[in-house]
Amino acid sequence: MFDIFSSFSPGTLKFLGAVLFVAGTVRGFAGFGAGMIFMPMATAIVYPPTAAAGFLFLDFAIAMPLVVRAVRICDWNTVIPAVAASVIFVHTGTWFLANGDVLMLRWVIFAIVAGLLALLVSGWRYHSKPTRAVSFGVGAVAGVLGGISQVSGPPVVAFWLSSAKEPAIVRANLIVFFALASIGTILAYWLNGFFTLEVGHFLVAGIPAYALGLFVGSKSFGKADPKYYRLIAYSLIAIAAITSMPALDAWLR
């Protein structure tokens, strides 16, 4: 279990450690975005199912301290409907992925994410109190996009960022949402046999770097000016939009 060099070379481990630290710092500060940073880089040198399963379990386990603090201040009235819808509609996204034209679906995803970003940058805010129906609808969109391409973050991020809530509550909502929504994904990965010995080696090697990044990012959030939270969140959504654009496959993949 602890013979990590039987699965990864020293150079690979150093690279993964550096990426995990950066991803953890972003996750600790913003409450989301680690997967957007880690997965495109890790899958260039690691078997994608290993990278996905390892990171999913790593993030779920190591981020628990963030969740414990977030549950005290998150807005449960909007988080629970969004989580429920995401868990249900992720299967719809998976069906589209299996039966639809993948290239067309990816362009649709790019258009949705880019449109959400443009709406946020425009300064528009959702000042009304979010109803359960609206929250459920946003979670459904997140679930569909997650099923198609694992890009489930932008809809819920845009939804809560556009509200009049302060950054601390927005961040707490995101932390709790992704923690609860990932439980179903962990079960699906386990049923499909994705948690292999290589994933165990990945966890042993990656825990220190990711935990340190989460700690640094979490501490930074408490000291940073709130305006920087939205700036970083916008930047992460922009990264999601750019990396999902099929026209850039030759450079990014």
Image (cartoon, helix red, strand yellow):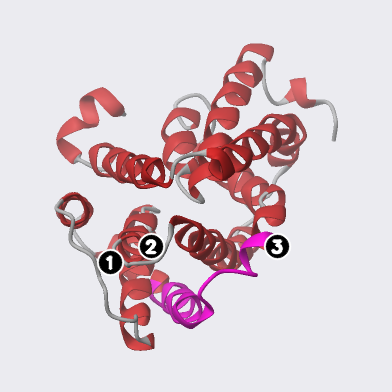
Name which residue lies at 26% across and 41% down.
238
Q: At which x and y percent is residue 38?
A: 49, 35
Is disc 2 surrounded by few (<14), some (14 to 19) or many (20+) residues within 10 Å? many
Residue identified by numbered label 2: 147
| Front residue of 161 and 52 | 161
Kind of element beneath mark 2: helix
* Residue 96 disc label: 1
* Residue 68 disc label: 3
In the image, which residues are magenta? 68-89
Kind of element beneath mark 3: helix
What is the CA distance from the residue labelled 1 to the residue labelled 2?
8 Å
Q: Along the horizontal axis of the image, is 155 left or right of 176?
A: left
Q: What residue type is labelled 3?
A: Val
Q: What residue type is labelled 2?
A: Gly
Q: In which quarter of the image is the C terminus?
A: top left
Residue lying farthest top?
Answer: 11
Say whether residue 74 is magenta.
Answer: yes
Q: In this rendering, is residue 118 above or below 45?
A: below
Q: At which x and y percent is residue 10?
A: 69, 13
Kind of element beneath mark 1: helix
For marks 1 and 2 on the same chain, the one whose residue lies earlier in the sequence: 1
What is the CA distance from the residue labelled 3 to the residue labelled 1?
35 Å
